[in-house]
Image: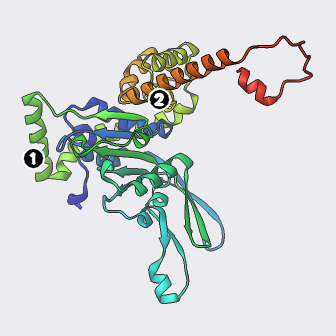
Amino acid sequence: MDEVLPFPLLALVGQPELKTALILGLINPQIGGVLISGPYGVGKTTSVRGLLDIMPRREQQWADAEGTTHTSYEPMRLIELPLNARLEDVVGGINERVAIEQQRVILDEGVLALAHRNLLYVDEINLLDPAVVKAILDAAAQGRTLVRRGPMTRLFPSQFFLVGSMNPEEGPLRPQILDRFGLRVWVMPLEDPQARLEAYRRTRLFRTDPSAFRLAYAAQTSALAEEVEAAREILPHVEIPPHLEELAMNLVQTLKVPSQRAEIALLEAARARAAADFRDRVSEEDVRQIAPLALRQRHSLQIDQYVCGNADEYSQINAALDALITPAPTKPQRLRKRSTVRQIEDT
C-alpha cells in the first residue's frame, strides 16, 4: 500500500501558484480546468496526485434490489488518462468480450464517463492524438459523451474537473485546446539552492517511509480538506461587486484578450478564492491575485493581425461602394415595424 500513497500536496517546496490553482479548481469546477506547464522534474504530476488527500466529497445515489434509492458521500476520484489511450478507450465502445461470447452488442462507457464528477488528469496533453483531445474537449464543454456505433447510441454524463500538464520542450498546445483551460500555471524550477536541497530531503524521507512522512503533514492536510469542503458550501453565496466586474472587463480589454472564456475564468476563480478565504464577497485583491493565472498566454498576435486585416477590407469595400453609388433623393417611408434583421444590423 505504501507504494501508492501520494506525496502530500502541502509538502511540495514552493510553487504557490500551482497549489493555489489546483485547490481553487476543486472548489469551483466552473473555472474551466487547470493547465500546468513546466520542464521535467518540477512536480507537475506529483502535485496533481497530492490532491487525493483533499478531494471533496460528492453525492452518490444508488438503488438496491428492491428499488429503494440510497444516498452516500464519497471523495472525488482521480482518473488518469494514459498517453497511449485509444479513442474507444476514452469515449467508449463495443464490449468485445460480450460480443464474442454472447453474440450481442453492448456499448460500454469510456474514461470520460468514469471521470463524471471526478478529476480527469491528462499528462503530456500536447502529445495526445488530436481525435482524443477533441473528444475530451467536447465532453468538458457539453457535460456528456455520446457513443455511437452504427445504429446504436448511448449517452453518458461526463462532467469533470480537467487538469492537463505538458512540457513546452515537446511542442506547443493548439490554441483551441489551450483556450479551454481556465487557469494556466508555469512551474518554474526552484532557483534557491536551499529550497532545492529541502525538496531533496523531503523526497528522500518520503521514499524511506511514506506513511511516517505523510503523518507529519496529516494535520495540515486534514485542515485543508475541511477548508475545501467549507469553501464549496460558501461558493454559491459569493457575490462580485459591480465595480470589480467592470475592473475585470477593462483588464481583459486592455490586454486585448479575444476569448470570452478569459473573464469567466478570472471571475469564477476570484469567487473561489473569496470562498476559500471564508468570504461571501470578492475583493480587489482576489482579482489581482487571480489575473496572472487566468489571463496569461491568452493574447494572440495572429488574431490581432486578422482583425486589422478585416477592418481594412471593410473600409475598402465601403469606400468603393460610396464611389460607385450616388444616393438618389427619395421620399422617406414610414415603416410600421423594423424587421428583426434590421434590428440586428442596427445594434
Judge whether residue 188 can be spotted in this image. Answer: yes
Q: How many marks?
A: 2
**Residue at the spot 38% in from the left edge and 65% down from the top edge:** 86
Residue 144, position as x, y percentages in the image: 56, 54
Identify the residue at image location x=47%, y=29%.
262
- Secondary element at tag 2: helix
**Tag 1: residue type?**
Arg
Question: Which x, y percent locates residue 61?
Answer: 58, 59
| Quarter of the image with the N terminus in it | bottom left
Quarter of the view holding residue 193: top left
Q: Residues within 10 Å of mark 1 (few under 14, many from 20)?
A: few
Q: Vertically, is 101 above or below 190?
A: below
Q: Name the side, left or right, on which 292 lies relative to 232.
A: left
Which of marks 2 and 1 precedes in the sequence? 1
| Residue type, label 2 | Ala
Secondary structure, mark 1, is helix
- Which of 204/111 is in front? 111
277 with respect to 189 (left or right): right
Residue position marked by numbered label 2 in the rendering: 262
Which image quadrant for residue 87? bottom left
Residue 254, given in percent of the width and then of the height, sits at 45, 16
Q: Position of residue 156 (x, y in %)?
A: 56, 60
Numbered label attached to residue 9: none
Q: CA distance from mark 1 to mark 2?
A: 40 Å
Q: Which mark is residue 204?
A: 1
Residue 161 or 233: which is nearer the viewer? 161
Who's the residue at 41% across and 52% down the image? 133
